[in-house]
Image (tube, grey):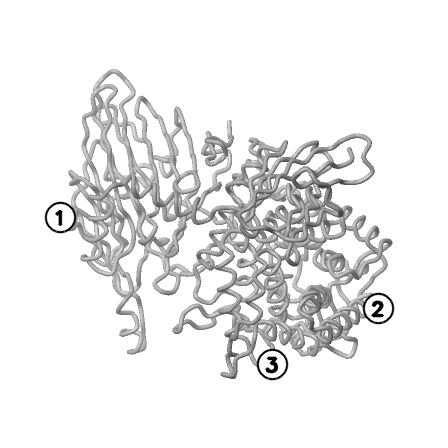
Amino acid sequence: MPSFIENGTRFHLDDPKLAPNSAAYLWNRRMMIQMNCRGYAVSQYMDPEPRKYAHPPIMPGQIFMLPEQGYYPNHPGRFFYLRDNDSGALFSAPYEPVRADLDRFAFEPGLSDIRWLIEKDGVRVELCLVLPVDDVAELWTVKITNTTAKRKSLSFVPFFPVGFMSWMNLGGHFDPALNAVVCTSVTPYQKIEQYFKNQHLKDITFLTADRRPDHFEVAQQAFEGEGGLHAPSALADGGHLRGGEAYYEIPACVMQWDLTIAGGASEDFRFVFGPAKDKAEIADLRAKYIDGDVEQVRRDAHAYVTEGGRSCLEIQSPDDTFNHFINHWLPRQVFYHGDTNRLTTDPQTRNYLQDALGVLFIRPQTTREVILHAVSQQHVSGKMPDGILLRPDAELKYINQVPHTDHGVWLAITVKAYLDETGDHSILDEQVAWTDDPTPATIREHVTRALRFLAAAVDERGLPYIEQGDWCDPMNMVGYKGKGVSGWLAEASSYAMSLWSKVCAAEGDEETASWLKSEAAALVDSINRHLWDGDWYGRGITDDGVVFGISTDKEGRIFLNAQSWALLCGAADDDRKARMLTAIDEQLVTPFGVEIHAPSFTAMREDIGRLTQKWPGAAENGAVYNHAAAFYAASLYHVGEGDRGFQVLRAMLTDPERADIATRGQLPLYIPNYYRGAYRQFPRTAGRSSNLFNTGTVAWVYRAVIEQLCGVRGEGDGAVIAPQVPSSWQTLNFTRRLRGATFNVVFSREDGLAKQIVEIDGQCVESGRLAAIEAGRIYEVRVRSPR
């Protein structure tokens, strides 16, 4: 049955048909790969922009992974055929493309590798994939075992499709000196300057092995023939690969070994697959990973993920699935975001800063560097850019060429969180110049000016302009004429200003603190005057003055973000809070989480934008969009609704049970950016995972668990200990590392208590506040709460 194994550091799936698209991912700083349980793959690397080295059989898009990625017979993958040469029976591992009924199947992704175990007709195949820390390469090991007592004659045929590399030039051949299939191409270009710019590109894809193949094939059609990939003509009737090359034909890396394996004996293989600039680079990678120590590569990869991404929290709760996810898989996903910047050279500013918000709890120095780099591209007016350039030769692309208005909010939130977590107030005095003015200014001034810019960009109602999007970037037509406003941005700006006013007050800048409080209050007043609809808040006002996200709307009646951030900024009093929560429960809550809005739009609404053109229930059009749900969870904890907050967080995790895995199509190894919504409109597909692990969700979930559920967070020179533990949990033990100190916390519920009591080293602490944190000290904390 599906389950966590190895103390939660690995997951076991025993059926390739249960959730065919379920997948796991690996990465290093230069590449990532997502492998699904059946052998299909999506991979890309930086060169220096994102590129692929295994392509579909058509002209591909180079950049994005697709939500709800579809797989098809010729989709890129990593496949291993096994043929019994006596019976002619054929199967493939992990499962595609033959799809034979297997005697045993195990897909077991771990923190730093992905492995499979497949058995069929007395043959066991063990596959393992690991990525080296420093190179763009896949290292595969394969072990083939004859589990019977009799000798077996087998043909072993790895098949790594390369796909349509280039319309301009593509081909492939076998290179005996490298013992590799080498697939070549020329990246298409038109302008002469592109020829010189492309000189560095890795236009080769190769597969090299640790032993010479008996046969090979490089032209995919010659391998596939009339039989198709499930029964390749080249392997029919006991045939051998014919040593063909690819001449302006779609290439593939195909090798064949004819094996005779005694009963109980095994054969081991090692492969490296990836891109290269030239044959010298292939030779170098061979020396490292074919001739080198594979176990050291695995140890290094494991250390890279587990030590490099070490969490500041370990918990032991009554919920084992939650424990495994929080202790291992969530910090891993958070670390991936902060480590790779989602494999782009121009991350959206909101993504860059929120990913840094998450990695703050793993590598605070990385967050510090992100803050300094982000403000170096801020305009002297205070405006933050739509994207952050990570290289001198990078350019703003795609969505970063569209004006959005929310980026200054994330700067204030991230810097405030950094101060709370680290106590490093020296960052406020760091001097950084503006992108359009060489005069340096302190980080304190950069943040304050970002908020002043937001405060000035408002209409006559005091509500902020949305331009062509806020956090919801496909909400691109609310304000493209220059008049539309964002209710959510009003709430978020008010919240950010309230946070920053506390920093200014603590720094002795009462004038700025007072101004920020006044601006925050004015925004709240405008929100309540213009956007309260009786039971919930509207999402915004269009260019034509139409309030949307209100009860009279047939579609998009209620938007989650407008309610969440109203709680965060304090706009909603107790009566309004109760009404909002009821409306959310009735209209947005589903078995798979909380939808971003409902009902989903079924037709284009030209005064809102392209989000209304997305399929109902997909992505920003009414999905359980986990980033928005994480905001909601944060807001619930903010107002003391801890049980509701936990329910929202827990709904993001797939349960390790057949029914939930089958419905969601995902394993509990990461939070996807969404689960399909429109639960009340299209229930059959509701809950289906996007299987995309790039998401700002994880930073907010991680922070909510650390600072709210477990409730140990920095404040000033000290700490606050105020856990909001689910009422169904009678106990919770956890260790939290904060500012060089360790807090070992034991939480329990007891009868007869009127309020929660916090004891540190045996001494009762009023309101759970510790005045100062002593680095290097271990604090023994006991929290007793009413049952």
Disc 3 from disc 2: Cα separation: 29 Å
Residue 271 position in % (x across, y down):
26, 43
Question: Label for residue 496?
Answer: none
Question: Label for residue 529?
Answer: 2
| Amino acid residing under circle 1 | Pro
Which residue matches tag 1? 176
Q: Residue furthest left?
A: 177
In which quarter of the view is residue 85 placed? top left
Observer able to see residue 593 = no
Question: Label for residue 381?
Answer: 3
Q: Nearer the viewer, mark 3 or mark 2?
A: 3
Q: Earlier in the sequence, mark 2 or mark 1?
A: 1
Q: Earlier in the sequence, mark 3 or mark 2?
A: 3
Could you say which is closer to the camera, residue 437 or residue 527?
Answer: 437
Q: Earlier in the sequence, mark 3 or mark 1?
A: 1
Observer able to see residue 753 = yes
Disc 2 from disc 1: Cα separation: 76 Å
Q: Nearer the viewer, mark 2 or mark 1?
A: 2
Residue 509 position in % (x across, y down):
69, 73
| Amino acid residing under circle 3 | Ser
Secondary element at tag 2: helix
Vertical placement of residue 493 versus 320, above or below: below
Binning the other alpha carbons within 10 Å of mark 3 as few (below 14), some (14 to 19) or many (20 upward) gives some
Disc 3 from disc 1: Cα separation: 61 Å
In which quarter of the view is residue 652 placed? top right
